[in-house]
Structure formats: structure tokens, C-alpha cells
Amino acid sequence: MPESVTAGLARFNLDVPLLLGATGDEFDSAWSAEEPDRPVLSAEERAAARAAGSRITDSLFRSAVPRVARARAGADTWSYTFEWPSPLTGGSSHCIDLPFFFDVLDAPGVTEALGENPPAALARDLHADMARFVTTGAVEWPRAAGELGDSSRLYSAEGAGNEVITGAYDPVTSAPQVQVEQVRGEQ
């Protein structure tokens, strides 16, 4: 690539609105007990696996949200965080927001990932916000700038929030970031 992703985000398509977010537990929620091929872990092993998953979640997904917003400083950028925990995994794991995003809770395979009764109102709320963004290029909460205290739309349990909150990404906003070039040993 001729330049880093961050540099490209700061230079190109700043006229295109962007809405981005992550789930709260991308890679740190447990798997379903209904998966017989998975090993049975002790409580200590589960805690260690969750801690490792939290680091992956923060490093690869959650930290990208403020980093992208900061790179697009001054451009129309908004963030959300999806925190509804599946009763099957115990967390809001990777891609769990997609059936809510598209309001397809009745699609094949959704029950196996989300359980018997995922909150329909949450799907309606999230889908309405996403459809509004796609049709208007804006949402009804403050823009994100990649700074401490940025506003984000919280999607959680039915009747328990789904409001605008501040600081959802604060734990990863000021964390040092390892650049790809550093990993490869390039200068």
C-alpha cells in the first residue's frame, strides 16, 4: 500500500459520512454449551481465555473505532457500541449485531446464535438508526472525533438503555497502538 490505512482515512473520502462500531465482546464471550466438540475448561482456564479474548477485542476491533474517528477529524463520523449479551455465549460476540442491524431475527440460524427470544425492539431500534443513516447520511447523536468522552449510541437489552452514552471507547482511545510497520520491523 502506498500509505498507511490511518493516513488514507485522513485524506480520502472525508465527504462520505461514516458510522462505525463494535460489539462489546468481539472475541471474549464463551461459546455455547451445546457445542460438544469444544473442550470443557476449568474456571481458571475460562477466565484466562476471556482475558485473552478481551485483549483481542480491544486491539483489533474496539480500538479501531476511535482511531478511525480521529483520522477523519472534522468529517461526519459517528460511533455505536452493541452490548446485548446472547444467552448462548454470555456476551455480545463478533457479528452478533448483524441480525439486529438488518432486523432479521427470524432468519435461519439466528435462534442458534441468539437464543429463542432475542429482543425484537432492539432490532427495530438498531435497524431504524441504520436505515436512517443509509438514507440521510446522518444519525441523531453527536459525532465522534476519536477523543475521550466521545458520544456513542449504546444498543443493549430491550428497555435497558439504547441511549447515547459518552466514553464507550475511552478504555481504548488513549491506549498506545502497535503499527503494522513496527510488527514487521520496518521503519
Image (tube, rainbow, N blue to C red):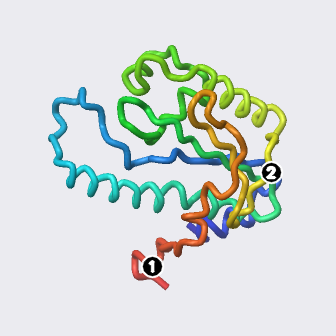
Q: Position of residue 63 (x, y in %)?
A: 55, 61
Residue drawn at 52 percent across, 72 percent down: 177
- Residue occupied by mark 2: 142
Q: Dot 1: within a 10 Å radius of its alpha carbon, few (fewer than 14), some, or many (20 or more) residues?
A: few
Residue drawn at 49 percent across, 85 percent down: 187
Q: Nearer the viewer, mark 1 or mark 2?
A: 2
Would residue 142 appear left or right of 44 to someone viewing this image? right
Q: Quadrant of residue 166?
A: bottom right
Would residue 48 appear left or right of 119 to someone viewing this image? left
**What secondary structure is marked by label 2?**
loop
- Residue 64 higher or lower than 33, as above or below: below
Q: Are marks 1 and 2 in contact (CB under 8 Å)?
A: no
The amino acid type of the residue labelled 1 equals: Gln
Residue drawn at 62 percent across, 38 percent down: 155
**What secondary structure is marked by label 1?**
helix
Q: Dot 2: within a 10 Å radius of its alpha carbon, few (fewer than 14), some, or many (20 or more) residues?
A: some
Residue drawn at 40 percent across, 61 percent down: 55
**Going from the N terminus, do you reach mark 1 or mark 2 first?**
2
Q: Quadrant of residue 175?
A: bottom right
- Residue occupied by mark 1: 182
- Residue 28 higher or lower than 108, as above or below: below
Which residue occupies the foreground of this view, 137 or 38?
38
- Residue 154 higher or lower than 105, as above or below: below
Q: Position of residue 117 (x, y in %)?
A: 47, 18
Would residue 68 appear left or right of 132 to someone viewing this image? left
